[in-house]
Amino acid sequence: MNRRAMFLEVLGISAEWMPRDVPVADQPTEAPVGSVASPAVVARAAAPVALTMAEAVVADAPVSKPAAPLASSAPVDAPVVAASDAHPNADADPDSAAIDLERAATVEAFDVPAAAPVQRPAVARTSEHAGREAAIAAMPWAELGDAVAGCTACGLCQSRSNTVFGVGDQQAEWMLVGEAPGENEDLQGEPFVGQAGKLLDNMLAALGLARGRNVYIANVLKCRPPGNRNPEPDEVAQCEPYLKRQIALIKPKVIVVLGRFAAQSLLRSDTPIGKLRGAVHSYEGIPVVVTYHPAYLLRTLTDKARAWEDLCLAREVHDRAGAQA
């Protein structure tokens, strides 16, 4: 095998594509004077290299399939796949595969709608589950509190010290909703205690409110997740009827949601808290204002001013609802 054939084989070209009307041996390197050469002949004479199948098509030269194509050669009628669309495989160059994966991840990151609904794993809704929700929806305060205290609907009952039902005025015009009890709340059985609770009390005092006066405070979950981890979808599904009944009994004029998880759970949205802030949302016909969790504000002092703006918005919503009543 000569060098030319070896070179073509390395390039994956198993045969030289030549115009049928001009034999290789008789092909002129220069067109005779007064004659008209075909475009393929001119191209061949100007650049004496092997024509690939694509080049032959461009030059309008008829081609013939190689008698024995290489195993790695694609069929002639195979669809062309762009390099950026190719899926990396075990034989691909590692650097190229990494670039393709990074590009795909970047596209996916920018292709997700900001306000897409929360994708929660399906929770089986049996007739027993529906009957439990209906029973909770009809409970008065005392029975509701007992139901929460003895609840064993999810695995959190195994690690809790106390359930955290809620605290405050049961006829309050303001309702505050957080995520779940932390360690201190689990030990004391009351929401928002410790340093985060003190900051929340100061925030309420700035509005002329107090924990035991015209405010009710509750959480999405009534039991502490171990290690203060994020609540699981099934845990939220089991606790939602309790919070829904609390809101229905209180009938507040405004709900202030504290923190990302509580906001996304109550509003059924995965929109970032930064985009949920500054707008008035609705839950069961009740105005909802979203702000940061007090524990977050203890770590991020620069956002305290934004939290105050949220509380001022909530006060405007409350005053407007009172004027319309």
Image (spheres, helix red, strand yellow):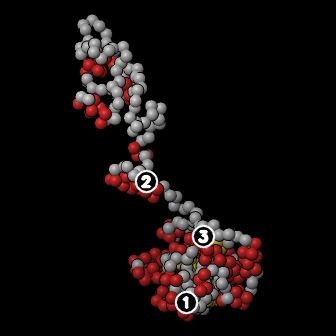
Labels 1 & 3 near each other (Cβ < 8 A): no
Local packing at callout 1 (Cα closer than 10 Å; few below 14, some 14-19, many 20+) is: many
Q: Please tell me whether residue 77 is drawn above or below residue 242 in the rendered image.
A: above
Q: Please tell me whether residue 58 is drawn above or below residue 11 in the rendered image.
A: above
Per the image, the residue denoted by label 3 is: 267
Q: For numbered disc 3, what is the local secondary structure?
A: helix
Per the model, the C-alpha gap separating discs 1 and 3 is: 25 Å
Image disc number at residue 85: none
Residue in view at x 56 percent, y 71 percent: 264
Residue in view at x 47 percent, y 32 percent: 77
Rendered-image quadrant of the N terminus: top left
Question: On the image, which quarter does residue 251 sit in?
Answer: bottom right
Give amino acid for label 3.
Leu
Would you say residue 313 is visible in this rendering? Answer: no
Local packing at callout 3 (Cα closer than 10 Å; few below 14, some 14-19, many 20+) is: some
Q: Please tell me whether residue 235 is drawn above or below residue 95 in the rendered image.
A: below
Dot placed on the residue nearer the N-terminal end, 2 or 1: 2
Q: For numbered disc 2, what is the local secondary structure?
A: helix
The x and y percentages for residue 124 are: 68, 69
Dot placed on the residue nearer the N-terminal end, 1 or 3: 1
The x and y percentages for residue 152 are: 66, 84
Give amino acid for label 1.
Asp
Per the image, the residue denoted by label 2 is: 104
Give amino acid for label 2.
Ala
The x and y percentages for residue 205 are: 52, 88
**In the image, which is nearer the foreground, mark 3 or mark 2?**
2
